[in-house]
Image (cartoon, rainbow, N blue to C red):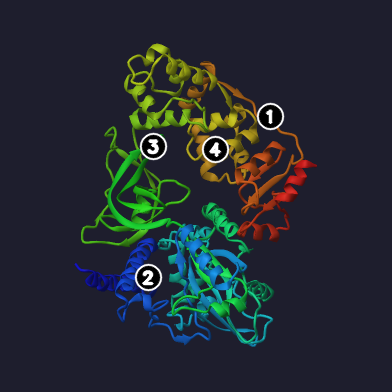
Amino acid sequence: MDRKERMSELVELLNEYAYRYYTLDEPTVADAEYDRLYDELLQLEKEFGYSLDNSPTRRVGDAVLKGFKSVRHLGRLYSLDKCQTKEALSTWIDKLVKTCGYMPKCSLEYKFDGLTINLLYRDGRLERAATRGNGVEGEDVTEQVKTIKCVPLSISYKGVVEVQGEGIMRLSALAEYNSRSNVTPLKNARNGVAGAIRNLDPKVTAARRLEVICYNVNYIEDEFLSGSDMIKFLKDNKFKVSDKFDLFDGKDALIAALDGIEEKRDGLDFLIDGAVIKVDDTAIREELGYTEKFPKWAVAFKFPAQEATTTLLDVIWQVSRTGKLNPLAVLEPVDLAGVTVSRATLSNISEIRRKDIKIGSRVFIRRSNDVIPEILGIAEHTAQSVDVSKPAVCPACGAPVVEDGVFLKCSNARNCAPAIVSAMAHFASRDAMDIDGLSDKTLETLYNEGKLNHYVDIYKLKAEDFIGIEGFADKKISNLLGAIEKSKKAALDRFIYALGIPNIGKKAAKQLADSFKTLDGVMQANYFDLKAIDDFGDIMANGLIDYWADEKHREEVADLISSGVNIETKQAVIGALSGKKIVLTGSLPTLKRSQAKQLIEQHGGEVSDSISKSVNLVVAGEDAGSKLAKAQKLAIEIIDETKLLELIKD
């Protein structure tokens, strides 16, 4: 295929993808893949010096959906030029400086990943809301947008004004929506917005709890001196705006600030795919002007993609430490955030059925926080698509599989090799008994040699048990036996976590230790005692009671204590924050969440994840979100990081 044929192919392919995304709300390809093909087309058009009449590079948006009335914007809505490396951004800024003769002050904002909304107000009332469409005309979605509570129906400004914003669905709202049993799970928050706004039934919009974050005045009869003045105007008229709006008059500081945004990206409750840099002075904006598609005074810096599309090749079932069979997706390798990905998590067979996931289909995957990716949903089925089979027997030991709610479990978990080895690996892990050197591979070898079968067997190991095991010389054996001996002195919360009690993670283990102080207190706790702990629901409370009701579990604990394991009693910490239950929300200026939590606990405070009437303080940072709003509603005292540090100091 020659390059002209490739150009025609790309135009057809990109237009099909755009049609499915914008018109049908059924995306079949991730943004990163679309951008790669789009950039390839741009390069070919640059080489040949022309573009085809139907090339997507000739327009900003896409066709208007026939089910909606077409409306014309008062001011044209432009797209943004983009760069994906700091070198490219540096070049853009250098060109800006050369044109202006100096470095103009620039703003740095989040690039929200949602759906552009244009709001028209006349005489102080919302007259119309529209999608961006092709930049000149969009779809009238007024009734849908009226259901979004943060969009003001009236404003104090009485002139004619168009306000541009981004419709978003918070990740917490997406999770809540997808948890409902009567809905088809949404693929991602971006698709959730598009499908809600561009839906002929406003009730669908209302059900998804959307927001519109406003960032630009697209048309107004008055004038602004700067982008900063626009933001002030939006705030004064009670539009929802982003907390991220920083000004820079130096290139190095601006570029360095991108790292801070990218670090916070995974902790935000909404999707961003980059940052936007704009010249702040509107007079300079006028001088710089526009290309056919972009303003010359703004650019989008794109972060590495966290989502991609690929093919699901197979689903394999792995036995966990509790005997649960966990499905693992085998993927056609794809590059995602700089890493080649070939595996992804799947929750359970029920979720596989609910998301209509099939082997051979194209799927959306997402990766964040450097963890194994998850499958968000189906991009499209193919002729090769087949259902995922539910295993009848355990893939490890051949025992019958039993159903436990939405999960599948091995009926022989106490004697199933992978479950035993995984349980001991968890017991020895850093956050549990912290036995350095006792790896999964070593545990598997010792199990196969008949040396280990229960937790207590770890404390019976001798130097001669390692003879003949590859990689174990005298020094390594001595170090491992020393680590085992050291682990006998165990903090109560670590010991509880090490036991691998279903649904009891690190946080719950610490809450149990803080509440009951001793192992005996934890073992004797009744349902009402457990329910009094924050976030302890029926499943956790009943699960813990059932765990201790099993005599074998009590015997395991007794054997560990008999072997020399000494479980420390939890001592109450007396300090400046004693008796205070504190919630952390948003990004703090200098402290990481883990550091702030540690400081609070060191000074006697208790950190809670949820807002309730029993909370005494809320420490709020940037992008605090719904927790802050709930705290304000309950009249809970709200402080910032500076005040927290003052309290500790005092």
In the rendered image, the quadrant that contains the C terminus is top right
Residue located beneath label 1 in the image: 571
Q: Is residue 523 above or below residue 536?
A: above
Q: Is residue 44 left or right of residue 543?
A: left
Residue 484 at what x, y percent from top left? 49, 20
- In the rendered image, which residue does mark 4 sit on? 506
State which tag comes first along the sequence, 2 or 4. Answer: 2
Q: Is residue 17 visible?
A: no
Q: Amino acid at mark 2?
A: Tyr
Secondary structure, mark 2, is: helix
One can see residue 497 in this view: yes
Q: Which mark is residue 175?
A: none
Q: Which residue is mark 2?
A: 21
Given residues 579 and 380, the one toward you in this image is: 380
Residue in the foreground of this view, choosing between 546 and 298:
298
Q: Which residue is mark 3?
A: 320
Could you tell which of marks 3 and 1 lies nearer the N-terminus?
A: 3
